[in-house]
Amino acid sequence: MEVILIISCVLVVTGLGLWLHDRLSRRREGGDSVGLTDGATGSGAESAAGAEPEEEECCGMHITCERDSLLTSVSPEIVYYDDEELDRFRGRGADEYSDEEIEEFRDVLLTLLPDDIAGWGRSVQQRGIILPTPIRQELLMIVAEAREARTSHS
């Protein structure tokens, strides 16, 4: 019984030490909250785009690469994909959409050309529109599948 208590105490102390080290190292790197937001909080993905240090090249094999590429503004010019009607959703949170509004986003997403999907995601972000959570997940999945298809053909 004493051995289990000693092991538990050692694990708790080690975990606490690692947590403190992580917190201090993040503060030194320039911010306590390093990482991407999913847009559900309403703060938008725009503020998270500059929080991540940019890597030289994304391998396309990890979901974080997909998120980084969709959050990176390639050019300041906003490109519309015949979806101007979505601008009325600017400033709305990811979980504040009705089923009909989610379907409206899905209709636009599914009618895009495969090469335009990642660009559409960037365009929506630049316009201050936070995608509904299910559409965001679908967008990430489609981009990941397209990258996987491209890398398998290479």
Image: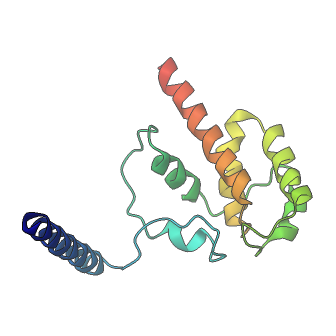
Q: Residue at x 83, y 69 (%)?
A: 89
Residue 98: x %, y % from top left: 87, 63
Task: Pinpoint residue 143: horizontal percent, then vertical percent.
Answer: 61, 40
Point out residue 97 in the picture as x, y percentages from the top left corner. Answer: 82, 65
Q: Can residue 136 be seen in this view?
A: yes
Up/down of 30 relative to 148, above or below: below
Q: Nearer the viewer, residue 30 or 137?
A: 137
Residue 55 placement (x, y as % from top left):
37, 53
Left/right placement of residue 78 relative to residue 13 reads right
Residue at position x 72%, y 60% from top? Answer: 131
Quarter holding residue 35: bottom left
User: In this rendering, would 116 be left or right of 73?
Assistant: right
Depth check: 3 or 145 in front?
3
Q: Residue 80 is drawn in which quadrant? A: bottom right
Q: In this view, does 7 lie to the left or right of 87?
A: left
Nearer to us in this view, 51 or 101: 101
Q: In this figure, which colouring scheme has been used for the structure?
A: rainbow
Spot the residue most to the front. Answer: 1
Q: In this view, does 58 lie above or below 154?
A: below
Figure quadrant of the N terminus: bottom left
Residue in view at x 83 percent, y 56 percent: 102
